[in-house]
Amino acid sequence: MSQTTKHPKQLYLLFFTEMWERFSFYGMKALLLAYMVTQLKFDEPKGYAILGAYSALVYTMPMFGGMLADKFLGYRRAIIFGGIMMAIGHIVLAIPQDWSFFYGMAFIICGNGFFKPNVSSLVGTLYDNNDPKKDSAFSLFYMGINIGAALGGLLCGYVGQQINWHYGFGLAGIFMVLGLVVFIIGKSSLKEKGLPLTNDLFKKIGGFITIEYVIYLLTLVTLPLIVTLFNYYEALDSIMLGLAVISVVYILYLSSKLKKEAKFKLLSALTLVVVSTFFWAFYEQNAGSLNLFAMRNVDMHVFGIALPALSVNNFLPPAWVIILSLAFATLWPWLNKRGLEPSTPAKFAMSFIFVAAGFFTFYLACQASLSHGLIPLVAFAGGYFFIICGEMCISPVGLSMITKLSPINIVGLMMGIFFFFTAIGEFLAGKIGALMSIPKDVVEANNPVLSLPYYANVLLQISIYSAGIGVFIFFLVPVLKKWMGNIR
């Protein structure tokens, strides 16, 4: 590999740190909905609502964690504190007590808020804005995320469903600790990258406690508030809408203080971030409704062997990402050299078209299987192929876009807002999933022929809406490209 195409070694430190953290995160998430429905005996709409609330809060907290890292903590401290909180959360989930379920999720939500945006922002510091390797680096980084997610979904899904649910949660915790250890051992190689930009962090409040420890204590105080939200999850409708309005208004306010070129770059980033909400609302069915769909209506037999549905469903998406990350990490630079690489807005539009194709594949498989109620595993895997092609056009590209279009002093905040609008998508995903809730009498009958039509109808609607949004974004491409200037 020539010097011009070689990535810095620090990328691989962050690659492995994120890989093991995502093992724990997605391994645990693979179990959540099925655990609530089969073990806690929540009805399906309540299970989807709590999953949506959890997912929304998981992706809302990075907005605050990113802002605090920008202003006070720096990326490194935020990552370490977040990793510790997440490890505690997984350990709490492994405790077979009634109180542990919501508190374990609360620790993970707070920890993810500090960890997730800042490890991604730290990757961005390794490259100049117009370095053609930057999108490629984020694709490779994204592959690390999904190696962890694939292994986590496969192993935790198997252990949880086949052996013991709490053992599955505990296994996720072990690998969270491993990711944290990897980062602590290797962080010295980052040199000055990721350190606090100012010394405000060490100022004492009241003469006896630093701002750093105030941040940690306030985070702990947040835990019971999050648990309360789980018990009153209906309130999240108003909270998410309010935070969305506040975050957009705040970024518009910040943009008004920038020079013209920087202002329009930030506005183009904000536009694409808001649009991405709908992508995640469709995509995140894989952690919710498609888990139950796989358990009820996908033929999991291969050569006469019955595969565990949770393992398969939570392995397929990241496994496709691992394969396609290599392809897309090569494709974008190859197209760039020939002047053919799609712009960032065009990639966002393509992501919706691919998702539409994936859900339409599921729908066609349902229509072909109405007589017996079980779609072939190959069709299930094929639908995910298209959906993950869409993911490759929006998620790593979006992470890279934030670091290229945001002013340096608010990169962490904008990364957090990117994840916050992902949170809104996750919240909407719970509501879409609830539309695929199967009536109780059909569930008790355990007859795939009866449940399949309920899924097929919503799968078709998702496909139609996703295609429509993709076409709409294509119409916006010329305007957004103009706003972005010389940034692709």
Image (tube, rainbow, N blue to C red):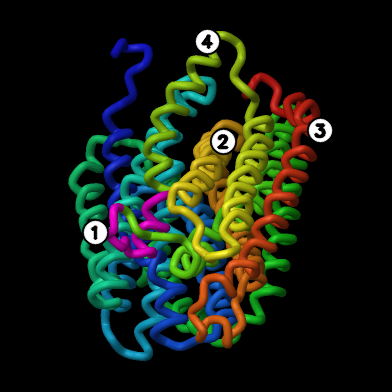
User: Are there few (<14), some (14-19), or many (20+) residues within 10 Å of tag 2?
Assistant: many
Snapshot quadrant of residue 245: bottom right
Q: Earlier in the sequence, mark 4 or mark 1?
A: 1
SS at mark 4 in the image: helix
Give whichever of 462, 284 is nearer the camera.
462
Query: Left of 191 or right of it: where is 376?
Result: right
Residue 232 in percent (x, y) is at 60, 86
- Quarter holding residue 168: bottom left
Label for residue 337? 4
State the separation of the CA atoms marked 3 and 4.
26 Å
Q: Is residue 287 magenta?
A: no
- Give, as a single range, the part of the protein colored magenta: 303-316
Q: Amino acid at mark 1?
A: Phe
- Residue 440 place in picture, x, y as percent: 57, 86
Instruction: Tell us which disc is closer to us: 1 or 3.
Output: 3
Q: Determine the CA span between mark 3 and mark 2.
A: 17 Å
| Residue on which the image places disc 2 | 393
Vertical order, 135 against 355 (above or below): above
Which of the two labelled residues, at mark 3 and mark 4, occupies the earlier sequence position?
4
**Residue 175 — which label?**
1
Residue at 37% across, 45% down: 319
Q: Between marks 4 and 2, how big is the CA–CA gap?
A: 18 Å
Which residue was labeled with disc 3?
A: 475
Upstream in the sequence, badge 3 or badge 2?
Answer: 2
Q: Are marks 3 and 2 in contact (CB under 8 Å)?
A: no
Nearer the observer, 256 or 391:
391
